[in-house]
Amino acid sequence: MADERNREREPEPGQKTFYDAFIASRREFDERQSKGQVVIKPSDREYQQTRQGRIMYYLNSQAYKDTPLADWRVFVHDIRTHSGKHRHQGGFVIYVIEGRGYSMVDDERVDWGPGDLLLLPIKPGGVEHQHFNLDEGKPCRWIAFCYLPVFDHVASEFTQMQTSPQYSG
Ligand SMILES: [Fe+2]
């Protein structure tokens, strides 16, 4: 009688074992670290109007496979009037590039300007937030840095409460 605990499946000819696939993935990782693009220019990227806002990803693991540091999500948010409102876990660092604005973070208003660093704290249930440009018609941009393993380890979900007024999709 076959013992389920010792079930063994022979790989088909030419088929990799899971072990081989893992070793291959480590080689791909090495390759990406040694040969991946380490300077990413805005001209390599494009903005997308999303339900949260107008966003340009420097790093995004779904979109770009040719960079080292695949575990970071790094993006610029260009706030025309205000962003959508959503909730997710904190652990984000946001650096203000230009413009004056404020964010509503769990109903508390926090104002910011060029050179400021905005932190989204890690809290039970996550942080609800929305971003506003105080000088409509003038550029207002920040860049966010999110390290995905931390995001996973604090079990972050995403819930959209309001969509950006510029979003038509
Ligand atoms: Fe957010």
Image: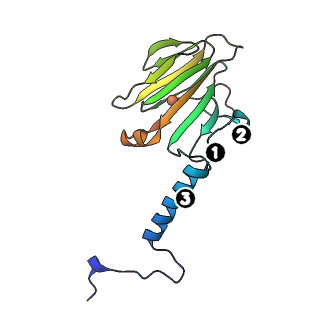
Give the SS element for disc 2. Answer: helix
**Kind of residue sitting beneath label 1:** Gln
Give the SS element for disc 3. Answer: helix
The residue lying at 56 percent from left, 16 percent from top is 115
The answer to which quarter of the image holds residue 45 is top right
Q: Nearer the viewer, residue 112 or 103?
A: 112
Against 24, residue 45 (above or below) is above
The residue lying at 64 percent from left, 45 percent from top is 37
* x, y percent for residue 7: 32, 80
The residue labelled by disc 1 is: 37
Against 137, residue 53 (above or below) is below
The residue lying at 51 percent from left, 32 percent from top is 145
Against 115, residue 65 (above or below) is below
Instruction: Sort mark 2 into few (<14), some (14-19) or many (20+) by Cα contacts within 10 Å.
Output: few
The residue labelled by disc 2 is: 44
Instruction: Sort mark 3 into few (<14), some (14-19) or many (20+) by Cα contacts within 10 Å.
Output: few
